[in-house]
Image (cartoon, helix red, strand yellow):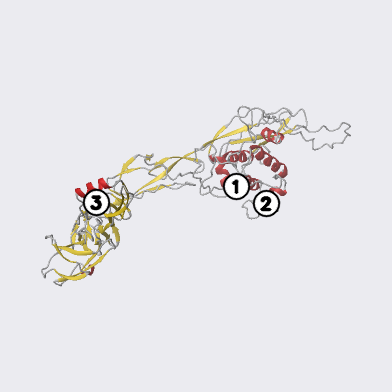
Amino acid sequence: MVRKRVISIASFLVVIVCITFIVIFNNQRVVFANMGGNEGTYSMITSSVDIEITGVDDGRLYNTNVTPQFNIGTATLNGSPFTSGTQINAEGSYTLTVTAGSQTETIQFLIVKTPPTGTVIVNQGNQYTNSVGVSISISPDAGLTAITHLQFSFNGNPYRQIPYASSFILVIGNNDGEKVLSFKLVDGAGNESPEYVSPVISGVAEGGSYTSSQTITFNEGTATLNGNPFVSGTSVGANGSYVLVVTDHAGNSTTITFNINKPVPMKYTVKYDGNGATGGQEPVDSQSYENGHDVTVSDNSGNLVRTGFAFDGWNTSVDGSGINYVANNTFNINASDVTLYALWKINSYTLSFESNGGNVVATQNILYNTTATEPTAPNKPGYTFGGWFKEVALINQWSFTIDVITADKTLYAKWTISNSSNNNGGGSNPSPPQNSIPVPTPNTQPTPEEPKPERPVVTFKDLLGHWAKEMIEELASQGMITGYPDGSFHPNEHIKRHHMALIITRAFEFGPIREAVSFSDVSPSHPYYEAIMSLQQAGIVDGANGAFNPNHSLTRAEMAKILTLAFEIKPGGTVAFQDVPTTHWSYDYIAALAELEIVLGDNGKFKPDEPVTRAQFVAMMYRALNVIQ
């Protein structure tokens, strides 16, 4: 009921006449002062309206947006200011409080738009039953509100709604045949869940037998085929017996057994053979081909290599007499398996002769692993030719009947000074007649010192004042190292691993002690391939994870190992360097070189993991050569 208080117009006029000042309003009581200074207290009659809230009801559930409105006062919604007529669309629990003067109205309501979810299990998950009724078990998921009703449909008929119960028996009749039950869950807000229905499978039928591939689909859930995960829409074509089980998220499953029996065509394979490869892997063709199908020839994807040979494609015969193929060629399967053999082209290498002051000797082109033809001995006035040697240091003599060419090679002439000026051709002094007895005569003249063979002196323009100048120019004069075309050496530049291989093999001849194992990052076309592989077969260098890292800078520790193995120095000893603990992988190599003073430290440190400069490399080589000789 709306209560109203009324003040008359006449009384109001009296107040206007009599009142000089309005002093204060207090709890609907008004105090006036008259012209005489007397005060009086009078009752004031006012008008009041009750709070009315529309658009929402207290305690209600809603599954749509709501727009609360109120006629007077101010309001808060969940403690925040709220304006009448504002739409609320977010799910949640709400408290709306409207205040007008001493009046307060509060209502609570709930907005739930999310359909309820849960698990509906029919007949305990079994596909078959002989009963007229099946058990229904429902497990709701946690949500904002409880499920109040259950809707069900039988074989596609309109849904019927019944009060919610977590389990009950549903009568389905005693007629044989497939029966499809569908369910929906309904909450107090009227939200309906998606339809829950047993999986429906198409493409195969229970007990079916098929002579062609079948594409199987199902409308929901997950599936297994013979125990393995199966995706809807996948074609099954292999001959055999199959069991397909489709299970929905509620645990309902449908099982179908079927067979596929179709003629199996003959399948043929393509195999690749390395045919003598010393490294790499043959390509693998995992496909099988029916008769008449095209095959695309693989490239050398496994980086097959063969020492002394270059890969030149594939051939259908092991001896290369069949049909040649290169990468991406195609051929047809002709009712048989096919093996393609790597085709190898033998490498040709250059044998050069450094006559060391003698007349020029022509170079030879020699096939891999074959002997060279011994050239005519060179001439050098005042000297006797002493043969061709494998290294600048003239240590190992080359045998033209035994030694074979495995890489580009330079042989070096050895000379000894002639004891007679009549022997300018390089022969030996004639022996005295056997029937004569030589009578020694005193030699009053001192024997002249035998002059050393002449050797070009090499200098570099950027070594003036450098600590390693003499050592660098000495090894350069021996042909072991070279500089840059502009006449510089760049002594402080880091040396690369592939440059190290070239210099070491230029100075020494190494025999193989193990099978060649190719590196993934050093192809036969690499300019230093033969040098790197020579050190690998000699057991001097190894890769890391199948790679040689040719462009990486050589570290001081790596250099210590290489020199120790190249000069056949026994590893071991004691290291006094602070930064080389006994657990360091290169400890024994560094110790061996340190004891021979081939390597030196810097303020008690060796810095094993720092890159080697070109000058440091030459210094270690120089000291090693002098110690070993």
Tell me the residue at 28%/52% (across/down): 90
Dot 2 lies on which element? loop
Image-quadrant location for residue 160: bottom left
Determine the CA span between mark 1 and mark 2.
13 Å
Name the residue carrying label 2.
570
Q: Earlier in the sequence, mark 1 or mark 3?
A: 3
Give the residue type at disc 1.
Answer: Ile
Give the residue type at disc 3.
Answer: Ile
Tell me the residue at 21%/51% (across/down): 7
Which of the two residues, 397 or 154, is positioned nearer the viewer here?
Answer: 154
Name the residue carrying label 1.
540
Q: Residue furthest front?
A: 36
Residue 404 appearing in the image:
no
Q: Is residue 153 left or right of residue 87?
A: left
Q: Is residue 585 left or right of residue 207?
A: right
Q: Is residue 357 left or right of residue 139?
A: right
* Image depth: mark 1 or mark 3 in front: 3
